[in-house]
Amino acid sequence: MTAVMLHRTSPPIMPDRTANAVIKSRRTSVLAGRSTAGHAVHVVSAVDFESEMAESLVFIAATVRDESGSRRPRCVRYPEPAKSGGIQGGLKSSTPLAVTSPGEPAMSTTPNQTDRATANPLTPLEPDGFENDGSVSGPQHLMKWAEAHHADFQPPVGNKYLYSGRDFFTMVIGGPNARNDFHKVDSEEFFMQLKGDIVIKTWEDGGIVDHLVKEGETFFIPPNVPHAPCRPANTLGLVVERRRPEGEIEHQMFFCDSCGELVHDQAFDCKDIVVHFRDAMEAFWADDSRNKCGHCGTRVTKPGPYELPANLRS
């Protein structure tokens, strides 16, 4: 049976379950298995483990692919600590650990194909730095990747995950986009323009400021600055953002083109910026109860593909 050795200093997901733990070292051997429910699972043995724990459970990131191909999160549970010290005093053993979900029976250790850990369970099918066998993904040529995924860069936003991890995510965005919303969140955003020139609008001191970002340039958005990236056709950019903590609210804001007043501020806990943001703006454009300016009566409707103004073209 082939074992995959994983070395972790902190679990890649479910960090809240280990917030009270000070982990000095952990070395785990992951073997293939299958649960009595028929899911492919990991069976884990711990060796040379030392930890000061406030709880008797340690959770290690894992997902399991069931027969339908869907991924399901699994957690690793240590058995109750022995009376003579237990986990509080440090554990050095080869006690078998099992990846389970709540209410699922104990699992067998019949050899089977393993599944990889998922760095971000909210987007389990997106690239996260792991291959299906648990190994770390190798480098890739960015422009060749973008060319291969050209069909995925569709309006209104035109974005696709290059990497979706626990702490941050990276998107590649192809033009043209077709949006008139401003995005505001309590974290920074880093823009790098790979091909062509774009405009990033910011809302500052009650008015819109246009920032021309040329090919090869970078642009940084500070926290809580409403901004609107405007991407013409045949452009390509890369954006890096911090993963939002659970409960952190971000805003999708729409301003009136006629009088400049705020028409609607959609505040929500965004779990997947590629899907959730697109669906939210489509719903706003279609809702006449929300898209009408209360000051002058102008409606904010779905725009066409963005075109760079003539005075900004080089």
Image (tube, helix red, strand yellow):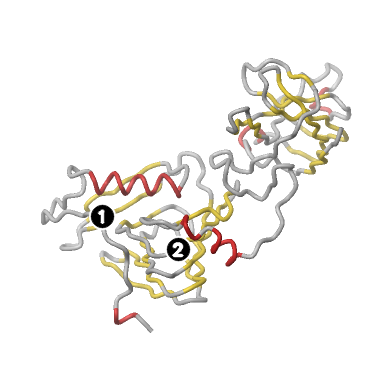
Q: Is residue 256 left or right of residue 71?
A: left
Residue wearing tag 2 = 174
Q: Position of residue 277 (x, y in %)?
A: 39, 48
Quarter that holds the N terminus: top right
Check the image and report above or below for 73 versus 150.
Answer: above
Residue wearing tag 1 = 302
Q: Secondary structure at mark 1?
A: loop
Check the image and report above or below for 185 versus 105.
Answer: below
Q: Position of residue 55 (x, y in %)?
A: 70, 26
Residue type indicated by callout 2: Gly
Tally of marks = 2
Q: Mark 1 or mark 2, which has the lower sequence index?
A: 2
Residue at horizontal 57 percent and vertical 46 percent from the top? 126
Q: Secondary structure at mark 2?
A: strand
Residue at horizontal 69 percent and vertical 31 percent from the top? 59
Measure the C-alpha gap from mark 1 to mark 2.
19 Å
